[in-house]
Amino acid sequence: MSEEKSLNFIEEIVEADLAAGKYPSITTRFPPEPNGYLHIGHAKSICLNFGLAKKYGGKTNLRFDDTNPVTEDTEYVESIKNDVKWLGFEWAAELYASDYFEQLYAFAMQLVEKGLAYVDDSTSEEIAAQKGTPTQSGTRNKYADRTVAENVQLFADMKSGKYADGEKVLRVKIDMASPNMLLRDPIIYRIKHAHHHRTGDKWCVYPMYDFAHGQSDSIEKITHSICTLEFVPHRPLYDWCIDQLGTFPSKQYEFARLNMTYTVMSKRKLLQLVNENMVNGWDDPRMSTISGMRRRGYPAASIREFCDRIGIAKRDNLIDVGLLEFCVREELNKIALRRMVVFDPLKVVITNYDKVEEILTSENNPEDEHGGVREIPFSKELYIERDDFMEVPAKKYFRLAPGQMVRLKSAYIIKCDDVVKDADGNITEVHCSYIPESRSGADTSGINVKGTLHWVSAQHAINAEIRLYDRLFNVEDVANAEGDFKSYINPNSLQIVHNAFAEPQLAKDEHQQPFQFLRKGYFVLDRDTNTNQLVFNRTVTLKDAWAKEVKKS
Ligand code: ATP
Ligand code: MG
């Protein structure tokens, strides 16, 4: 598919750079801050960075952008590695910005020595006030006039722990009148007496993002440093630092971040959902996290396909979650094993069935010619879905009703003869007769029926809990909805079917194996399954309500 597709704008840049001999090969990086679990937006960035290197024979580093000690944690580092691997990518090197702290400090000191950086004692409020506004120049304070020798000493003292948090910062001297506010003597180092998940208590000064990120790129000789659009105004600072230090000329390129309907994608918000117990952890199957999607049963291939289809845009947009679900269905249809599970059982007694049981077979996957078959037991008492029976059938109701015939999938045609009710008038079971000559695969009955139902044999059925997920939010554009995003949580995003009846094969099937429960959707076994109870997550419903919008163009 990618052969026929035209190049995206980043591929065009890469091809031009390679053709001009600018670099012998390309190096990209994926630079997560380990302050949360990765989400589908990160998957977009992963597919882009690793995909480019793969396509052009380059390499991609996994770099943890761990320059903020307060919010970062090794739990996140592990989850991120896990998710990138699961998505199907291999990094050339696992690197940490914190490993460059010594080098980054030395770079900053070089700027001080060149008279390009100064220590400022102002409070953050004072600094903000002196910055000016987009239409009004800022003003430099007296600290900007400190001598190089003074600044060298003060910066060294900042590092050695002489000052408290916030007492001093290091700023680079660029242009207080620049229309780009980020160039008005930005801060590149601040004091933070905090424990870092890797460097412990060794450091009490930490570099700011703009300085650390560009210089880390340079250290790793990243050729194409790809980030999202909000970093466009940061690019001049990125270039300025590289120019002044004469380090490897990494270049920054920006693309539109992925936004998706009915969900949130900022780690800060996802963390709130976790901390306030609005979901069951980072890998709750309703979350936009990669771990949540994995647990829900989304195949990695479908996430890659989704990222490929949405392409690389230069303008922000909102992608329909229906497109992701479409990709999930397409993939699952190819690989899911077909099974039968009855969610809301109604007992059917086959009055003329006089065998104890028989073992029938049914295809595992009609989409896969090597899929094979499984055995399904048939017996006198079965369960069908309660809503597959109507005592007084509506027009064009082709399922079971008094006097009406249906086929039981991979089994026989049955006809409803009688309805049994309790004292309150509730239907407790239906009595049917079966047509012995109508067995699937050997049907000589000559009878044609319109409805085919899924079913399970009552005595062989195993109990299962089924978790049905829906969208976590009930507005399309959650990030831009007015007020607190949590007020838009869909109260029905999780529904649990406690006593479903599953065909016995499901007790032998493997974890991680995707299933299609006939007429019900796609499902996967959840890790909450134990020896007493099978638990399934609904990955996605069968019906593609979005088919029209997302048809392959
Ligand atoms: P968040 O705002 O969700 O916390 P972030 O940008 O702070 O995300 P990082 O860990 O800094 O998260 O991001 C790592 C990489 O993933 C960055 O290059 C970032 O641009 C990219 N990225 C993050 N969110 C998205 C998104 N929604 N779409 C595309 N790329 C993204
Ligand atoms: Mg970030």
Image (spheres, rainbow, N blue to C red):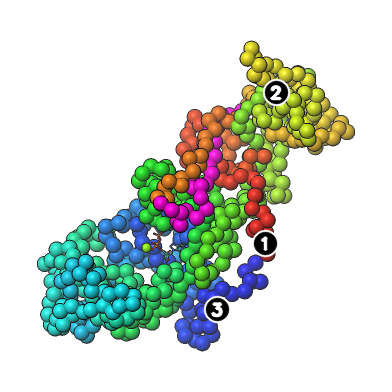
Indicate whether residue 470 is drawn in magenta.
Answer: yes
Badge 1, how many Cα within 10 Å: few under 14, some, many 20+? Answer: few
Q: Residue type at mark 1?
A: Lys
User: Depth-wise, is mark 1 or mark 2 nearer the camera?
Assistant: 1
Query: Which residue is at 21% across, 59% downward?
Result: 194
The residue pinned by badge 2 equals: 348
Q: Tell me what residue is drawn at x 51 percent, y 47 percent.
A: 474
Vertical side of 66 occupied by 74: above or below: above
Of mark 2 and mark 3, the one earlier in the sequence is: 3
Give the label on residue 12, or none.
3
* Residue 188 percent across, percent down from the top left: 26, 73
Extreme residue toward the bottom, this view: 20
Label 2: element kind: strand
Query: Element type at marker 3?
Result: helix
Q: Within the magenta stretch, is there residue 351?
A: no
Assess mark 2: CB under 8 A from ligand 1?
A: no
Q: Which residue is mark 1?
A: 552
Disc 2 to disc 3, how far (Cα)? 64 Å
**What is the three-letter code of the residue carrying label 2?**
Val
Specify whether 8 is left or right of 70.
Answer: right
